[in-house]
Amino acid sequence: MKVNQQPSTSFMREPKIYMREKFDRDRTKFREFLHEVKLYICMQRDRDLDEAFKVGFIGTLLCDQALSWFAPILEKNMEVLQDYEGFLQELTATFGDADTS
């Protein structure tokens, strides 16, 4: 009788991913922040995250002047709240490094 030695994926836990710090608008930290956000969202593949959730998640990671930029978007319930890729484009246009954007 053979016993299956492979671990069952149903019992494997997702790795915990921690965002190191919130983004305040420092352009020198933007690419790193964006990579962390994209990686975190990518790692949630078992969940069906909608566009608004992804944008809202990023919004929770903004502080200071970056949060001040985001607040009117949220308050006016702008369409970009439902468009993850569009939001990333606006975020990058606003805070991305001009040399690499």
Image (cartoon, rainbow, N blue to C red):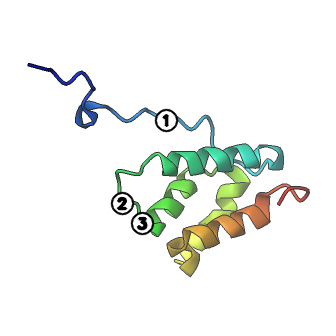
Q: Residue furthest right?
A: 99
Q: Is the Cβ of the residue at disc 3 closer than 8 Å to that at disc 2?
A: yes
For badge 2, the amino acid type reads Asp
Name the one closer to the observer, 18 or 39.
Answer: 39
The answer to whether any part of residue 72 appears in the image is no
What residue sits right under mark 1 in the picture?
A: 17
For badge 3, the amino acid type reads Asp
What residue sits right under mark 3 in the picture?
A: 50
**Place of residue 49 in the rendered image (x, y in percent of width and height, measured from the top left):** 40, 60
In the picture, the quarter occupied by the C terminus is bottom right
Kindly identify the residue that appears in the image at 56 percent across and 67 percent down: 84
Rounded to the nearest angstrom, the CA distance separating label 1 from label 2 is 18 Å
Residue 10 to residue 50: above or below? above
**Place of residue 90 in the rendered image (x, y in percent of width and height, measured from the top left):** 70, 69
Callout 2: helix, strand or loop? loop
Q: Is the Cβ of the residue at disc 1 closer than 8 Å to that at disc 3?
A: no
Which of the marked residues, 1 or 2, is nearer the chain's N terminus?
1
Residue 12 to residue 28: above or below? above
In the picture, the quarter occupied by the N terminus is top left
Packing grade of label 2 (10 A; few <14, some 14-19, many >=20) is: few
Name the one closer to the observer, 70 or 43.
Answer: 43
**Place of residue 59 in the rendered image (x, y in percent of width and height, measured from the top left):** 56, 57
Query: Which mark, by number, is residue 76?
Result: none
Callout 1: helix, strand or loop? loop
Q: Residue furthest left?
A: 1
Rounded to the nearest angstrom, the CA distance separating label 1 from label 3 is 19 Å
Kindly identify the residue that appears in the image at 54 percent across and 73 percent down: 83
What residue sits right under mark 2 in the picture?
A: 48
Name the one closer to the observer, 54 or 22.
Answer: 54
Callout 3: helix, strand or loop? loop
Which of the marked residues, 1 or 3, is nearer the chain's N terminus?
1
Rounded to the nearest angstrom, the CA distance separating label 3 from label 2 is 6 Å
